[in-house]
Image (cartoon, rainbow, N blue to C red):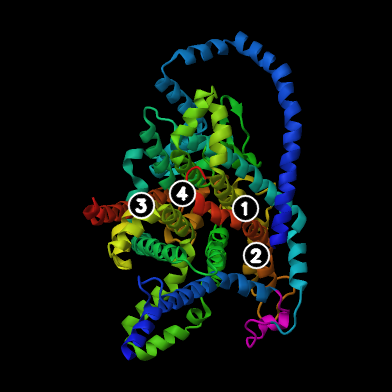
Amino acid sequence: MKKIINNIVSILLKVKLFLVKIWTPIKTFFKKKVNPIILIILKYTGLLWVKKQLNRLPNKIKKAIYGILFILPWLIGMIAIGIPILAKSIRMALSDKYYYIVNQGWQITGNWYDFTQFKRIFSDEPYHLTQILDTLKDVSLVVPLVVIFALILALMLNQKLKGRAIFRTIFFIPVILLSGNMLANFQSNGLLTVPAIANGTITSFLTDYFPAIFSEIVAQAFEKIVLILWLSGVQILIFLAGLQKMDASTYEAAEIDGASMWELFWKITLPALIPLMYINIIYTTIVYSNLSNNAIVSIINSSSDASGSLAGTLADEVNYGRAYSAALSWILFAIELTVIGGYTLVIKLASRRYE
Amino acid sequence: MNSLKSMNLKRVLLGRKGNDGLLFKIVLYILLTGISFIFLYPLLSMLSMSIMSLEDLIDTSISWIPRNFTILNYVNAFEWMNFFEAFSDSLKVSVYPTLATVISSALIGYGFGHYQFFGKKVLMGMMLAMFLIPTVLTYIPTTVLYRDLSIFGIDLQLMDSIRAFWVPALFGNGIRQTIFILIFYQFFRIIPHELFEAAEMDGSGPLRTFITIAIPMAAPAFLICGLYSFVWYWNETSLARLYFGSVYTTLPMSLESYINMYRSMYSQGQVTLDTVNSIYNTGVQYAMTLISIAPLLLVYLFAQKWFVEGVDRSGIAGN
């Protein structure tokens, strides 16, 4: 393995040398032939004048202009793609029906201020309402667990151990495997669990020796723990990056003063990781509430995706159509905001004593 | 004497600081190995099932090691998936958008990280807010919009083409691109300003400073973002189906349609455990799954050395 890597590295070095070799004639060619042409073009299009004016501007404004030029792709994307999508989905959620007629384009019925779909969800669809509440419960249970587990695992991986590199390699495998529909695939085949849990060995052991309520909760937690571990790949990475950044001398100083490992964790490590905790809460909430095994997401998928969202005609709008799904996904968005807001507030209040 | 011995024992077991004792190490190793097993379990069990013959798959007494080793499942999987075509489609569908994502994320991240301008915080807040919006919410409006999207009066004709993936990525609207922009933002923010000032003193323009100073400093960020976005585009099936399902069939898309077909046959009773078919069975399904993720695992195994080091180093500026 090492040999192969070394070979690849040496090949890459050779390629680099070769590139440097051919780069010099290209550079001189550009300097002699292309640059004058560009200069002429700049001169006649008036861009040279713009450049001169730019150079005259104070440094601060010049830099601001450069900054905006660098983020220009994002600005264009925001105006041309991001905001229109948002506007369309809001309009969709606030309509009675949203359908496509060939040669006439998209048709919208209903006034936006009627909030038809939202009224429908909250008064006519008790089953979907319970699903929404379950999702809220589920997300608000899983998110803190993922963050806490990720923190523990990152701390574990940060210890000086033999074979640390192997463990790290294995711990990031979920990141590679869990995207797209892979998670749903794995889950439906029962691969995201451990045989002892799947076969009910642990469950039967628990029910034999413990009261029913207790064993049920623990068994469910076991089921969830595997999923939680699978979900915590990126979060571990983020925490690890933060842990690596920490200054070793702070720890040494605290150790000399006689701080225990426990104190080190609560007084030095944790406060430094709080900003990353916000990032992880946001990330986990987004990823977890968008998984295809989420109740709301599966309602949306089954109601709007099956008929093909592009060719959706009026007939598809009879049951749970595009408008209904859009309203549901805005509720999902509200759930995300509630969870993120709630836990951010909790951490903010809890970390007050560090300030 | 005796008390000294017990003290020594205690020190060896528990350590002096709490995290260097033998007991601590043992517990740590047990936990890490257990969790590693959980992560490896799907891969291992798929591997073992994919080399089982039909009889072994039905036989419940065999759980891990097949009695009759076979590669027939892989042969069938290769044929069903039309491997080489699907593989080249997969590469096309993931490499171009990855390049677009990395380039535009680096530019945008640099703009946000290195420069100060009016309204920067508001814009970044907007970016984060857009990131919070559920992806399902955007599916339908996106397809509606992409059908006749034009930027600067140029009709982009995104539908039925990979452009539906890479053009939005070029404008900062790729799959989960906000994360990449934020990673680059963090990287460019921590590069010492003296370096840039020195370059600007020497008369280097903004683009040149970016290419010669900022990019080499953020090599780990390029690696992380490249790897992640490659994986995410590779595994994306629902968007791919919406945008260019009729033109390209990637490996994961092919796997998905196989699973759907298998399921519908199973529910109609055409395939049952007694009449297992040599083409539609769990062994072939797992062989296919492994084939479709094998390229990712290979890329990861080669990149992980730099990947993990990159994470280590990401904090240390000027290294």
Q: In this picture, which residue range is highlighted in magenta? A: B51-65
Q: Does the magenta portion include B57?
A: yes
- The percent position of residue A194, horizontal first and vertical second, equals 51, 77
Q: Quadrant of residue B211?
A: top right
Q: Please tell me if label 3 and label 1 are on a single chain.
A: no
Q: Amino acid at mark 4?
A: Gly
Mark 2 or 4: the one toward you: 4
* CA distance for labels 3 and 1: 29 Å
Question: Which is more toward the observer, B100 or A266?
Answer: A266
Q: Amino acid at mark 3?
A: Tyr
Q: Secondary structure at mark 1?
A: helix
Question: Which is more toward the observer, A83 or A172?
Answer: A172
Tell me if I can see residue B237 in this picture.
no
Q: Does the magenta portion include A42?
A: no
Q: Magenta stretch mostly in which secondary structure?
A: loop
Label at residue B234:
1
Q: Which chain does tag 2 point to? A: B
Q: Are marks 2 and 4 in contact (CB under 8 Å)?
A: no
Mark 4 or 1: the one toward you: 4
* CA distance for labels 2 and 3: 35 Å
- The percent position of residue A193, horizontal first and vertical second, equals 51, 74
B75 horizontally vs B152: left or right: right
Disc 1: CA contacts within 10 A as few (<14), some (14-19) or many (>=20): many
* CA distance for labels 1 and 2: 13 Å
Q: Secondary structure at mark 2?
A: helix
Label at residue B289:
2
Tell me if I can see residue A336 in this picture.
yes
Query: Badge 4 is on which residue?
Result: B315
Mark 3 or 1: the one toward you: 3
B287 horizontally vs B172: left or right: right
Query: Badge 3 is on which residue?
Result: A278
The residue that appears at 50% across and 79% down in the rendered structure is A198
